[in-house]
Image (cartoon, helix red, strand yellow):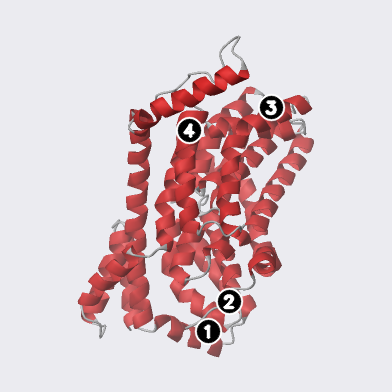
Amino acid sequence: MEAAVLFILVLGLLFLGVPIAISLGLSSILAIALFSQDSMSSVALQLFTASQNYTLLAIPFFILASAFMSTGGVARRIIRFAISTVGHLRGGLAIAAVFSCMLFAALSGSSPATVVAIGTIAIAGMREVGYTKEFAAGVIANAGTLGILIPPSIVMVVYSAATDVSVGRMFLAGVVPGIVAGLMLMVAIYINARIRGMPKQPFAGVSEIAAAAREAGWGLFLIIIILGGIYGGVFTPTEAAAVAAVYAFFIAVFIYRDMGPLKDVPWRRPGEGFGQSLVRNLALIVWKFIPGCFHGDTKKVLVESSKTTIMLMFIIVNALLFAHVLTSERIPQAITDWMVGAGFNWFTFLIAVNLLLLLGGQFMEPSGLLLIVAPVVFPIAIELGVDPIHLGIVMVVNMEIGMITPPIGLNLFVTSGITGMSLVQVVRAALPFVAILFLFLILVTYLPFLSTSLPYALMGPEIITNR
């Protein structure tokens, strides 16, 4: 009875247009007031406890790092590197766009940010050499979903906070599936390009590849800082996120100089020697460091990332309150007992999870949906022997597909915004590539080693206690 009322309240409020955070929080408070043995003081206690979650501190720092990387011209340099590497293949510019999304995903952890940063440049480039706008938009909308699968991923941090699994293991688990998904999209583009005779670029040459890699290297080094720092034992994931935010600020303002007080100031002047250039630039960085911290461009990035952080954290805190009500009323345990009694095994359970998430992903933002579903399905997965890391990756891949399915798919709206196409046009453009992601979802769901092989090899299996 309590479970039915709780879920009816949430769904009813959502269909009335109430924001997801308020829907979760209000339905939880009403459930506690009307049905639960908990006192109302538990609401304040849970909200305070959720706000003190150390793992969640990684989210605002990853959002800030992503904002600086999106603003600081990293995308343009990554695209140059990708084109020089694979642009000579048939359909190479589209393949390079997917490769660029994979690289940028490893910097941002956000799917919409990947679509904006890469799509703004790549779609225009593809149009110039003869690709249709629909094809270009479909490629970017789908490849952008890799932003939440390839680590570091904000959605993975949310899953870890909701289920108390290791963020480090989740990041490792996303590496192989992320590469496989990217390769599947690339192969599909190549086959399509061969059939339709799409254009290809001349081979750029080794010197151009080296120059592009050198230019993009400062940004791509962030991948080494985050993942190398975590798995080398230097940082916790939260500390790595903080270091990434500081590094992204420094690179955007003082190295690439696409924003801030040194914007458009060249690193090397005509006739200037290497030593003179180095001394001059070091002096400039020291002199302009404090002004750079308070520059209008920096403030703008901080304000925009703060808005995103506040919105997301408000959803997460209310979702964790909702999870507390589920747990206190033993709703997950009741569902587990029912599913086990009904003869569900790990195979049929994962089918049910996929169907639930694919349906929910059409109507809800990924982090909010994950925070609602994870506390319910996690105990069932453990009872049926599903690895918690594998379950996390399956859920993330479902969130990917939700990003490109109407009516609420965020990537569809973002792609529509940067291309000027209607939402219906973007949906039609993305549809052929969605089939690739559905095939990928089946592979990830029923080939667990894709998710678990790397974290098992480097960190061992996840140990679940007190479940």
Task: Give coordinates of residue 200: x percent, y percent.
Answer: 75, 28
Q: Is residue 322 left or right of residue 216?
A: left
The residue tagged 4 is 252
Residue position for label 1: 339
Measure how far apart labels 3 and 2 are at the Cα level: 50 Å
Q: CA distance from mark 2 to mark 4?
A: 46 Å
Q: Give how far apart the Cα atoms at labels 3 and 4 are.
A: 19 Å
Marks 1, 4: nearer the viewer: 4
The answer to which of 79 and 343 lies nearer the viewer is 79
As drawn, is 92 to the left or to the right of 249? right
Q: 306 or 281: nearer the eye?
A: 281
Lower sequence index among marks 3 and 4: 3
Name the amino acid, label 1.
Met
Alpha carbon separation for disc pair 3 and 1: 57 Å
Q: Are marks 2 and 4 in contact (CB under 8 Å)?
A: no
Q: Which residue is mark 3?
A: 211
Give me the C-alpha separation between circle 1 and circle 2. Answer: 8 Å
Q: Secondary structure at mark 4?
A: helix
Label 1's element? helix
The answer to whether 190 is drawn above or below residue 297 in the figure is below
Q: Which amino acid is tagged 4?
A: Ala
Does residue 51 sit above or below 110 in this rendering?
below
**Vertical arrangement, residue 99 with respect to residue 373, above or below:** above
* Gap between marks 1 and 4 measured at Cα: 51 Å
**Residue 446 in view, yes or no:** yes
Could you tell me residue 109's position as x and y percent? 51, 49
Q: Are marks 3 and 4 in contact (CB under 8 Å)?
A: no
Task: Tell me the residue that label 2 is attached to.
Answer: 349
